[in-house]
Amino acid sequence: MPLWKIYHPVGAFSAEQKKGLSEAITALYSRLPKFYVGVVFQEVAAESFYVGGEPADNFVRIWVDHIARTLPTAEARTWWIGACDAALAPYIRDRGFAWEFHIDETSYELWSIGGHRPPLPNTEDEKRWLAENKPSPVSEPA
């Protein structure tokens, strides 16, 4: 699953903007079941966010965890960073915020959803999860 943790100044995003940004992030993962994608917005008070030892009241920091897929090549990583930058820009850069993000990749073997081991990529079980948009027992071992 991708989990996006977005640390931002208090009041940086309205409920509508959070929904729009969450939808833009989810759209990046169109080949995965939508329920794989989690987005957490965490407001950080100005006196609690520092960059380079200075208060950062106009900075958005994003931490992404990837489990469902990895980015195995330099070309894939470059393409993905560009796609993420483009999806985030209208909600962050274009609104005047400074920003940064990074992606951690966790081993697929260390993952469970609702007590189920997720199906392997591109299997019939994963296609079913995508169509049903919910976890269920898998027939193919992960």
Image (cartoon, rainbow, N blue to C red):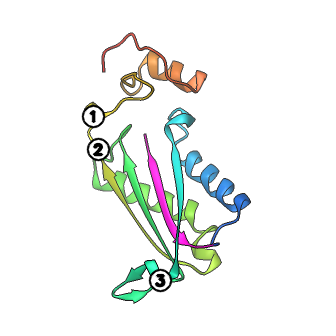
Q: Quadrant of the C terminus?
A: top left
- The tag earlier along the polypeptide, 3 or 1, is 3
Judging from the image, what secondary structure is the residue with disc 1 in? helix
The residue lying at 26 percent from left, 31 percent from top is: 109
- Is 101 left or right of 70, judged from the image as shown? right
The residue lying at 64 percent from left, 68 percent from top is: 90
Identify which amino acid the numbered label 3 is placed on. Glu
Identify which amino acid the numbered label 1 is placed on. Leu
The residue lying at 52 percent from left, 23 percent from top is: 129
Q: Quadrant of the N terminus?
A: top left
In the image, residue 77 above or below residue 29 = below
Q: Nearer the viewer, residue 26 or 86?
A: 26
- Is 102 left or right of 97, judged from the image as shown? left
Q: Main secondary structure of the magenta part?
A: strand
Judging from the image, what secondary structure is the residue with disc 3 in? helix
Would you name the residue on which mark 1 appears? 110
* Magenta residue span: 1-10
Q: Residue furthest bottom?
A: 54
Q: Nearer the viewer, residue 27 or 8?
A: 8
* Residue 121 position in % (x across, y down): 38, 28
Would you name the residue on which mark 3 appears? 47
Q: Are marks 3 and 2 in contact (CB under 8 Å)?
A: no
Q: Residue furthest right?
A: 16
The answer to whether residue 2 is magenta is yes
Would you name the residue on which mark 2 appears? 106
The answer to whether residue 24 is magenta is no
The residue lying at 59 percent from left, 23 percent from top is: 131
* Residue 39 position in % (x across, y down): 53, 51
Q: Quadrant of residue 58?
A: bottom right
- The tag earlier along the polypeptide, 3 or 2, is 3
